[in-house]
Image: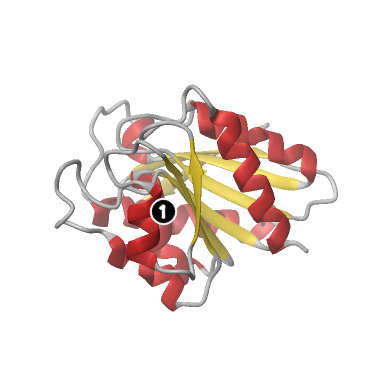
Amino acid sequence: MAVREIETPVGTARAHVLRAGDPRGSVVLSHGAGGGIGAKDLEALRAIVDEGWTYVLVEQPWRVAGKRLAPPPATLDRAWLPVMAALTSGRWRLPRPLVQGGRSAGARVGCRTAVQVGADAVLALSFPLHPPGRPESSRAAEARLVLDAGLPFAVVQGDRDPFGSPEDVREALGARAHVFRARGDHSFSKHPEDVVDEVRSWLNTLSA
């Protein structure tokens, strides 16, 4: 694994790059607002490297700085854009197709910035459709940015996720989104293999 520190307007980010031999493409993911890249589903997805996908886990600046709370969405986006610019140019250029996204808050960043970054597809793990108990505060508009741009979009959602069930996400986004059910709540700590299986199947459709 290669580790690269990338300066952003809001601090230093850190990219952990696992390069595949004869790559089929790249997957760049970030963590949620309450955790880091050590989340079990993010760790388990390292398995896609064996199938030809270069895999990058990005620690956002607030996490690198040791802070416990994530900054507002606009600040997260300001950090993400230069990270992706650094990973898609020069000697660090990632092979395409380029899939970006993350888990929870990281998934929201992936959706909001996909067009500006020039991503080829977006992967959302545990997309927080709404705050727990507040379905009226929907964030579906962020996910629709991906769909409206015509980009492939996959969501892996826990069947007991208080931020929105798989059915809630399907209803909010429609048939254009590929929504997969996995065992668990907002995390997949007990069954991260579900995430790997669903992501692997979806990635195969991108490189077919």
Badge 1 is on which residue? 80
* Farthest top residue in view: 190
Residue 157 shown left or right of residue 133 in the figure: right
Q: Is residue 185 above or below residue 127?
A: above
How many discs appear? 1
Q: For mark 1, give the secondary structure.
A: helix
User: 10 Å neighbourhood of mark 1: few (<14), some, or many (≥20)?
Assistant: many
Residue 10 shown left or right of residue 191 in the figure: left
* Quarter of the C terminus within the rendering: bottom right
* Farthest right residue in view: 22
Amino acid type at image mark 1? Trp
Q: Residue at x 37, y 49 (%)?
A: 127
Q: Where is residue 155? Give x, y as percent.
A: 47, 52
Give the camera-side residue of 20 and 198. 198
Can residue 95 be seen in this snapshot? yes
* Quarter of the N terminus within the rendering: top right
Q: Where is residue 165? Give x, y as percent.
A: 35, 46
Q: Is residue 150 above or below residue 44?
A: below
Residue 187 shown left or right of residue 162 in the figure: right
Q: Quadrant of residue 148?
A: bottom left
Q: Residue at x 67, y 57 (%)?
A: 93
Q: Where is residue 149? Give x, y as percent.
A: 46, 77
Q: Where is residue 159? Give x, y as percent.
A: 41, 39
Can residue 96 be seen in this snapshot? no
